[in-house]
Amino acid sequence: MSDTASPIRMLVVDDEPDLRELYVLTLLREGWQADEAGSVAQALECMTRREYEVAIVDMRLPDGEGTDILAWAQTQRRAERIIVATAYGSAASAVQALKMGAFDYLTKPVELSQLRQVVRSALGHRDSPAPLPTTAALQAMVGESAPMAAVKQTLRRCARGMAPVLIQGESGTGKELAARALHELSSRAAGPFVAVNCSAIPEHLLEAEFFGYRKGAFTGATSAHDGFFAAAAGGTLFLDEIGELPLSMQAKLLRAVQERKIRAIGETTEMPVDVRLVSATHRDLQRCVSDGSFRQDLYYRLNVIAVTMPPLRERLDDLPLLVEALLARIRHEHERPGLRLDAAALERLRDFGFAGNVRELENLLHRAAAMAASDLIGAADLEPDGDRPAPPARPPQPPAPHGQEREAAIASAPAQTPRVEAAASPADDDREIERLAGCLDDIERDTLRQALLDSGSDLEVAARKLGLPPRQLQWRLRRLRLDAN
């Protein structure tokens, strides 16, 4: 309900008088005040006279577009949260409005329950303390380099609305941490944050896990189950590895995103949902769209606001801060308060490719802490192959006979013993071992190149094809000086 000392006032902009009246009556029943406008000119006149908390704007108006009002509000730095109403099937106009700064959109014909829900979401900041500019998740995104500063600024800016966000970046760059920061910075911070790894769910269970099911809907459904959308109501639904969803599930997800409704398995009616959708992927989704493995319409729906997490190799200036933050955690876990890196070790880290990014750096520091002889970690402790066992020593060879001893030995040998070549020297053995090792490296190098080519340079897919853990593949690429790209 509204605060009588500070009434909540809204603006309804639509050229159809009956619809305007319906919207206004709905808002009045909730205790809010509302003004009306039937054109772009009337809307701008109203907004010039007073400030509004929320404006509900139709996209098609007699003298222009709803985006004209959005553009004006942006240039004037207006505080209103603008909700646009678009015709059914006008996905492109809705996406355009969200990119221009609209808080959210409604699909016409607008359901009044959905209207109330979206308006309440827009007013959420009035019912809870304003989010602080820095949150726990944002603080955990260690780094002050230009690429990281740009990411944090984007997260702060896009946290104000409801537009879907797509976070892209290589494995280990902190995509889930960015999604959590976005949630914590938004007015939905008091709601749940539900993280889903799309690649970890068997295909035949995807619909049930996303949308839920009712008791008796299928064999084994002995009780009702709420899906991820229901669990995230009022908060944020984070879909990690969205690029792994099969096409059949992409179609179902697209409908849920467009209609803001889901239907649980076994239900005959749809249920409205109130979630902020944030997705993440390490894949190039544009390439996936081109090769037909990802739906273009879903891609445009999810990629309204794009956030790209920079790889560690592009922000090496953050290494000292990252190392200190990670070592602080390792010190606590290992109860070694004096653990630290010397200057040479910190400089050595700059030479690593970090195909696994921050996650690889953390694993490297864990290993170095375990292998170091003291609390001071040196450059040698960081070498990835420092813990490989040395090759077994060759058994000692008797000294080769010389001069007369050699001739006597030949003369005394049994006549039936065939003559053989003289034994190779240790130097010859070493050269042969090196030659064989080089051949094996060439074979391994060709195998890894082919696996990367077949997987489109996707390290995780290539590792699965080779039957290797991703970290083992990364180590082999570094050892053989191969570029994963």
Image (cartoon, rainbow, N blue to C red):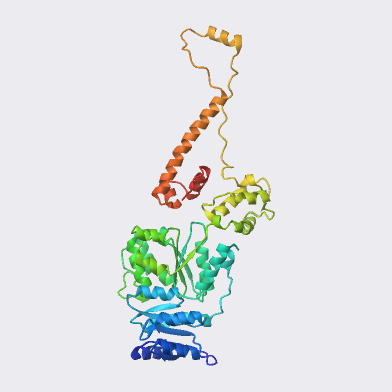
x and y percentages locating residue 18 in the rendered image: 34, 90
Left or right, 330 with respect to 25, comes to right
**The residue positioned farthest toward the right in the image shown:** 338
Q: Camera-side residue: 104 or 261?
A: 104
Q: Camera-side residue: 448 or 372?
A: 448
For residue 319, which quarter of the picture?
Answer: bottom right
Tell me what residue is drawn at x 63 percent, y 59 percent: 321
Q: Is residue 89 visible?
A: yes
| Total numbered labels | 0
Left or right, 21 with respect to 355, comes to left
x and y percentages locating residue 98 in the rendered image: 43, 75
Placement of 409 over or under 240, stated as above or below: above
Q: Is residue 29 visible?
A: no
Tell me what residue is drawn at x 36 percent, y 71 percent: 256
x and y percentages locating residue 164 in the rendered image: 44, 70
**The residue positioned farthest toward the bottom in the image shown:** 4
Tell me what residue is drawn at x 55 percent, y 34 percent: 391
Tell me what residue is drawn at x 56 percent, y 32 percent: 392
For residue 225, which quarter of the picture?
Answer: bottom left
Placement of 436 over or under 400, stated as above or below: below
x and y percentages locating residue 2 in the rendered image: 50, 89
